[in-house]
Image (cartoon, helix red, strand yellow):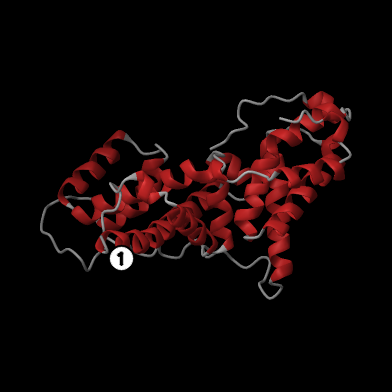
């Protein structure tokens, strides 16, 4: 992120520091003060704002589409058979 | 996306060899475990192997389950080990205990297109979803497994650390690197979609 913007605003948090904390921010593990600093930084740094928003969106998209993948019925049937559990399975 | 959180199982019944209770466990976790196998290994046959081996081992060892971790974390641990073992079999040249280079600098972003506001049906189109999967497969496996457990299966940082026998710090480092890597890959893809409009 260093080559793209050489702005002069006086935030204390560097782009690189923000990047290092971005995951912890998402996890809700940062202090209020540090969150405030991050928001201040992003207000004046478009690239970091974009990275932050697309970072969040990336996690969201994976989370949202995770349920797409389910074990197919034939795979489940073979599993129950292998485990000799056929008699106990309540088929949906 | 942990669709199994609402399930509760009787550990006592499972330990005592209650088949019906074990069947409930299999029903609840077959899809998450299959998904982990599929996304770790990339093909259905291997995913099925991970699924079967996981529950065969679980059945074999449930009598000794000590509840030091939750039942789901225990299952995910078996499944992750199975998946990693299969990966090693496929690529025996990769050393098993290769150091994870946790201290490596995180790579700086190069993608600054703002695609976050694209409509969700475009982001998650059939092609978009395929690209999400491709990006996961392009991750180094050590980052991939952490990302899958935390961000796809919804385990906590602590549970992920527990399942993979890693420290929480190592999980956080790998998670950050995985997420940044995926963001970068998706950025390249979605940026093209935006500029081609």
Residue projecting furthest to the left:
A8
Relative depth, front residue between B129 and B126: B126
Task: Mark 1: give few (<14), some (14-19) or many (20+) Cα within 10 Å.
Answer: some
Q: Residue at x 86, y 35 (%)?
A: A86
User: For the C terminus of chain A, which image quadrant?
Assistant: top right
Is residue B65 left or right of B71 when viewed as pictured? right
Q: Residue B81 placed where, x, y %?
A: 71, 54
Left or right, B119 with reference to B90:
left
Please identify the quarter of the rendering in which residue A83 is found. top right
Q: Which residue is mark 1?
A: B110
The answer to whether residue B181 is above or below residue B150 is: below
Q: Is residue B68 visible?
A: no
Relative image position of residue B174 (x, y in whole percent): 50, 55
Q: Position of residue A29 (x, y in %)?
A: 40, 38
**Which quadrant would residue B56 be assigned to in this image?**
top right
Q: Residue at x 26, y 44 (%)?
A: A38
Identify the residue at the far bottom of this view.
B93
């Amino acid at each position: 992120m260093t080559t793209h913007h050489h702005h002069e605003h006086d935030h204390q948090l560097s782009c690189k520091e923000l990047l290092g904390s971005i995951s912890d921010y998402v996890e809700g593990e940062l202090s209020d003060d540090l969150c405030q600093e991050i928001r201040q930084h992003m207000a004046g740094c478009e690239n970091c704002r974009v990275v932050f928003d697309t970072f969040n969106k990336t996690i969201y998209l994976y989370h949202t589409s995770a349920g797409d993948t389910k074990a197919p019925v034939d795979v489940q049937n073979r599993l129950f058979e292998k485990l000799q559990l056929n008699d106990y399975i309540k088929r949906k | 996306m942990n669709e199994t959180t609402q399930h509760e199982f009787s550990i006592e019944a499972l330990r005592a060899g209650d088949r019906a209770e074990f069947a409930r466990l299999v029903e609840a976790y077959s899809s998450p475990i299959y998904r982990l196998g599929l996304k770790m290994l990339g093909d259905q046959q291997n995913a099925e192997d991970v699924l079967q081996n996981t529950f065969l081992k679980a059945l074999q060892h449930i009598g000794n389950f000590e509840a030091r971790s939750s039942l789901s974390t225990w299952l995910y641990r078996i499944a992750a080990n199975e998946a990693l073992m299969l990966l090693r079999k496929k690529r025996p040249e990769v050393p098993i205990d290769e150091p994870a280079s946790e201290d490596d600098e995180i790579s700086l972003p190069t993608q600054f297109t703002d695609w976050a506001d694209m409509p969700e049906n475009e982001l998650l189109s059939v092609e978009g979803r395929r690209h999400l999967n491709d990006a996961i497969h392009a991750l180094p496996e050590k980052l991939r497994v952490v990302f899958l457990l935390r961000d796809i299966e919804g385990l906590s940082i602590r549970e992920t650390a527990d399942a993979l026998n890693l420290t929480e710090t190592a999980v956080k480092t790998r998670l950050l690197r995985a997420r940044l890597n995926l963001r970068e890959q998706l950025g390249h893809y979605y940026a093209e979609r935006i500029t081609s409009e």
